[in-house]
Amino acid sequence: MSDVATTNQDSHYIEEDEIDLRELWQTILKGKKIIAIVTVVIVALTFVYALKQPNVYKSESILIPTESASGGLGSLGGLAAMAGVSVGGGSMTPDVAFNSLLNNYEFMKKFVIKNKIYEYYSRDEFDKNYVFALGFRGFYEMFKSSKNPEDEIDYDSEIFELVKSIKSNFSISSDKKTALITVTYSDSDRSYPPVIINAFLKDASKYLVDNNLKIINSKLSYFEKELIKADGFELRQSLSQMISDILKEKVMIQSKVYYQCDVLTLPSKAYVKDKSKPKRGLILVVSFVTSIILGMFLVFFLEFIRKEED
């Protein structure tokens, strides 16, 4: 008897579930107009948004890192450190060094000011080279915000926001297998990324080379003094070899176009059809699916309110 009762109870639950599913489907059918309206409105707004967005293009430069000519200092390095002379700096790879400067606000602020990047983006026609889907820029112009000439400009705040934008558009990465360094920059003006990449690599390399030359000159000064004071032949020979290695490092670091790197490929202007984003098709598909879900939720919510009132 218990087995029969259990079976009947399970059948009752199944019937209730089937009834619930039918009710849900009937609710959806009754609210199909609402779902359709919600879908059309959201997809239409998304379509406008997608057309409003200009294409974004990416340029890249690939660098080949080269090993520093400096040799191991061994015990002489410890001796120099005890004397307060820095002998480091050779262990930092170029990609790490470039990323460090990219994330250094003071360096980036000077970079923006020196290369007149703020003036470039502040021009009235800074967006004249933007490319839009279907060649239509009407929605962009419609929603484009214009600056009032009478408004006071917070220059520091503008520079800060511009530095944030540049950092977000930059990417500096190193391939673990090949050690090649890829430097990329994205912008809606496809002619500008090569300019930014070249300017950044040039300024960053100068900063890093100048910093390393200070360290190298400090090492040379220290070991030359030690060479004058040295008595033993072996010590003098070791110091002379170290001075020779440091001089080689000095020549090597000044011989590169960019800091400890040779250039494999230079950045170039992207082809007009080779955009990196936005993915308009994907945006519309996601919008369509999401709008249907939201429409169904609204229908169920309205049905719930109606039943509560009854």
Image (cartoon, rainbow, N blue to C red):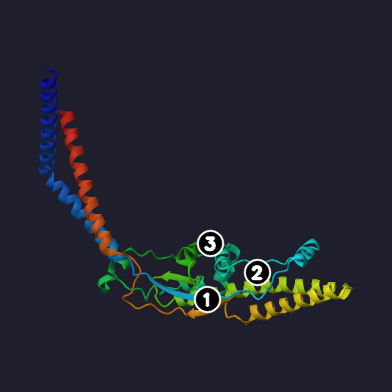
Q: Secondary structure at mark 3?
A: helix
296 lies above or below 80: above
Of the 4 image quadrants, the one containing the N terminus is top left
x and y, in percent, of residue 163 in the image: 52, 64
**Mark 1 or mark 3, earlier in chain:** 1
Query: Is residue 252 visible from the viewing direction of this image?
Result: yes
Q: Amino acid at mark 3?
A: Phe
Q: Secondary structure at mark 2?
A: loop
Q: Which residue in the structure is indicated by mark 2? A: 90
164 and 241: which one is in front? Answer: 241
90 lies above or below 300: below
x and y, in percent, of residue 106 in the image: 60, 64
Q: CA distance from mark 2 to mark 3?
A: 31 Å
**Mark 1 or mark 2, earlier in chain:** 1
Q: Which residue in the structure is indicated by mark 1? A: 64
Q: Amino acid at mark 2?
A: Gly
156 and 39: which one is in front? Answer: 39
Q: Report whether 15 appears left or right of 48.
A: left
Q: Amino acid at mark 1?
A: Ile
x and y, in percent, of residue 278 in the image: 33, 65
Specify the quadrant of the image occupied by residue 20.
Answer: top left
Pointer 2: residues within 10 angstroms few (<14), some, or many (20+)?
some
At 48% from the left and 74% from the top, the residue drawn is 120
- Residue 12: which disc? none
Q: Which residue in the structure is indicated by mark 3? A: 160
